[in-house]
Image: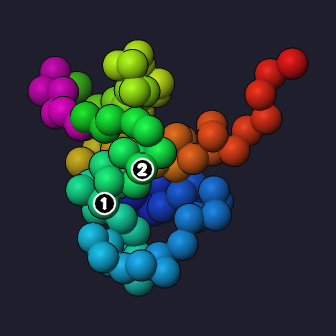
């Protein structure tokens, strides 16, 4: 996937770096939220983010749960930052999607 793709997906949800606190710079110069900032943004949306390294697959798995502790989503990435950014993009995209009929 790559960090650039995760950032593209995040920006596609309408995320902006108006507040640069906790942001990092991508190689192409764009700002993106670091893992701690992602956890804060997800907490404000009512989710708890956990990122762990999966040694068997040599990747990072980001999982988020709702206020009741029920799983709400999970993604993987090559780095902790990539997994965090992609998790935030998926969480934002799901929140913006219309409810199924």
Viewer-nearest residue: 50 or 67: 67
Residue under the image location 47 percent in, 24 percent down: 72
Q: Is the residue 56 above or below the residue 13 in the image?
A: above
**Mark 2 or mark 1, which is nearer the start of the sequence?**
1
Display colour scheme: rainbow
Residue displayed at 31% across by 37% down: 49
Please tell me the numbered disc located at residue 44: 2
Give the percent coordinates (x, y) of residue 26.
Answer: 36, 73
**Residue 89 in the image: x percent, y percent?**
52, 49
Asked whether residue 55 is drawn in magenta, I would say yes
**Element marked by disc 2:** helix
The reply to whether dot 1 and dot 2 touch (C-beta < 8 Å) is: no
Q: Which residue is the site of mark 1?
A: 37
User: Is 73 drawn above or below residue 101 in the view shown?
Assistant: below
Instruction: Report the span colored magenta.
Output: 51-56
Q: Position of residue 4 (x, y in %)?
A: 45, 62
Query: Does 40 appear above or below 75?
Result: below
Residue 56: x and y in percent read: 16, 21
Which image quarter is the C terminus in? top right
């Amino acid at each position: 996937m790559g960090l650039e793709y995760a950032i593209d997906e995040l920006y596609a949800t309408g995320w902006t770096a108006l507040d640069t606190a906790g942001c990092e710079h991508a190689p192409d110069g764009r700002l993106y939220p670091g893992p701690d900032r992602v956890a804060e943004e997800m907490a404000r949306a009512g989710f708890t983010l956990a990122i762990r390294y999966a040694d068997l697959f040599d990747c990072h798995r980001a999982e988020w749960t709702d206020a009741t502790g029920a799983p709400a989503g999970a993604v993987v990435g090559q780095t902790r930052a990539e997994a965090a950014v992609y998790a935030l993009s998926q969480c934002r995209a799901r929140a913006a999607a219309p409810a199924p009929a």
